[in-house]
Amino acid sequence: MGLSFVLPAALALSAFVALPILAHLAKQTPRERHPFGAMLLLERVVKRLRRRRRVKDPLVLLARILAVLAIVLGVSGAQWSYSGAVPEFGASGRVIVIIDNSMSMSLEDGGSTLLARARGEAVDFIEELPPGTLVGAVAFNSDARRLVQDLTPEHLLVTGKIEDVQPSGGASNLRSALSEARKLLASEPGEIVLFSDEAGPRIVGEARSELELVVEDGSSVIPFTIRADPPRNTAVTSAVYGDGLEGGRVAIRLTNFGPDPIEIPCEATLPDGAVVPIFADLPPEGEAEEHITVPREALGGVGQVACEDPDLQGDDARYFHLPRVGASRVLVVDGDPGDTPTRSEVYFLERALAPWGGKRTGVTPDVVPPSGLLGLDSDKHRVVFLANVSDPRPYGPRLTEFVRKGGALIISAGDNISARRYNSALGAILPAPFRKSRSLAASGEVGIPLNLPDPTHPLFGTFKRAGRAGFGKVRSRKVLTLEPFTESDDISILLRYSNGMPALIERRLGSGRVLLWTSSFDFDWGNLPVQSVFMPLVQGMVAYLGGEAGGAAARFDATVGDRVAIPLPDLVMEPDVLGPDGNPITSRIEASSLLFTASKPGAYQIVLENAPPLAWVAVNTPPDESDVRSYDSVAKAEAAIDPEMFTRTIDLGGGLLGLGLALLALSALLSAKGSS
């Protein structure tokens, strides 16, 4: 804001303002004459002369001074400039309307959302445009999309599309919206009218580069800011599991973005459905941290913290990862390490348990040689694999006690198995005494296939929909035989070969379990490791026995609107992605990664058909969207780029000249009136 001059040199004429002052101070002829001759009156004459030298008619003098100043300023081309004005729209005949439908626009204010107000104002704006004006429309959250493909004079078409814009949980990507608007304008001048709350610390700053391109094209962005007065919101901004008493604790951070203190009730829900209530006191525009204690044993998965906030409900829940708490680790005992990794007895078993190599997992298999059984801990381990271990006798009492206390033991056969040693060490917990191995096919033959399992059994429940036929492709050339036994409530055959021989046998000992796979987990006795059912079967065994496979616990985090990329390990079939409602969502595989877009907050599962979840993805709302306060404005940013765009200049020259002449006329009138 300020005064400027077209001809600043003309201001030198302001020196003429002294002329009326001098004229009023000059000797003045008295209006009345009174002769006198007495010297005694001299003192009175001096006093009257002093009065004559005083300025007479101050109003006339003031009018003349102002007249001179007004004429001088008028001649110099005085102009008054001020900033903050809104650029005119419609002059180019090309208008783009941008609607912000990010999460913060769902803020409730006066009984309606900001988005509803923005839609209404945008429709009213378009209806007032002159007929024939070409109009386009763009909506944006994490990404921008055109509501109409090209500029159109059909205003009703555009207003209909705007009225259909729905709220989203995405971020405010104004940069993408401006880019799409520039494309609609084909880099030609036009007006871009923005309906947004401009909330959050980065929305304007991140769009500045695109805003500069808009201005360079000769276009302008005209913001119609839609805000609550005052903006209020409370959000769960963080929930993280960590160490602590009992089974650990979840640290929960809540933030109040409003101007008033608030007490807010919340609930933390663990993956097993357990609910813990919380009450938090939040200061104005401040934070609070609460903690919940996790039980000593809890299922792994994705938990949720949800609070009651009437202002902006999209960010009232926060999703967090919780590993399996309690005895859950898997101890894998390699009975035949081999001379190379791929020749190890447990090479394929380890990858079936943890296809991501143990990264980002809450439960990682501990692969050890037989001596590692000395580290078996019932408070830490839930499942033990004995893979072709030759002599379990040194560890027999420890394994027996582990099972009797509720642990689970899975035994796989191989050439190292000695019936005498196993019967001696583990006879008390085996389904039946071991006998000897038996060949089912000659060398070079594919072997005997498995019969299909019973899908009603909990171990095979994941194969109910499909995939069960894959068991028919599993073949074994050799198996471990057992002494005759009778099935009962405690001993049952879960899988058989086509010739009726047992393939998978279970024995229950209280809460403990023993599973015996009568073939091997490598290629020595069969082809199981390369069959599609291998990984889901192994992970299903662990889950069935109360543990958690590493693959099932793979954990990733994402934000609503993100394009999520999950790396796919070896030996994994094409998995599906299940959304928060449990239904499949669109995904694709590209460059050994599984890609999908997280369109809403919640827990996403990466699953193979008929298998436990391979991974969990906790998707939360964008943190900046919870901050409904305004930090910057498009108008200020645009004014900094091109100050003239938001500056208005008023030409004062003609008005000042007219004012000067009017003041001269007024001074003449006052002078004539005073002399009459």
Image (cartoon, rainbow, N blue to C red):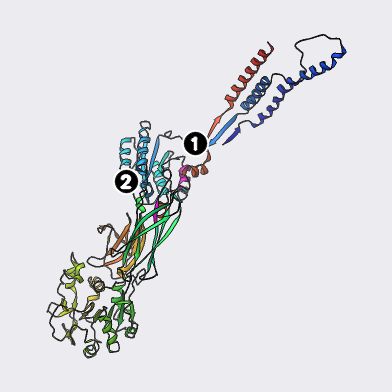
For the point 27% across and 85% down, the residue is 389
Q: Mark 2 points at which residue?
A: 166
Q: In this view, does 576 lie above or below 358?
A: above
How many labels, in total? 2
* 343 displayed left or right of 203: left
The secondary structure type at the circle numbered 1 is loop
Which mark identifies residue 298? none
Residue 544, position in %: x, y? Answer: 23, 72
For the point 64% across and 22% down, the residue is 67
Q: Which residue lies furthest to the right in this view?
A: 39
Q: Distance between the residues labelled 1 and 2?
A: 31 Å
Which mark identifies residue 85? 1
Q: In this view, does 482 lie above or below 76?
A: below
Nearer-the-camera pick, 541 or 177: 541
Q: Which quarter shows the N terminus?
A: top right
**Residue 652 lies within the magenta run:** no
Q: Which residue lies furthest to the front in this view?
A: 40
**Residue 233 lies within the magenta run:** yes
* 100 displayed left or right of 439: right
Magenta stretch bounds? 209-236
* 367 displayed left or right of 54: left
Q: Does the rendering let one see residue 351? A: yes
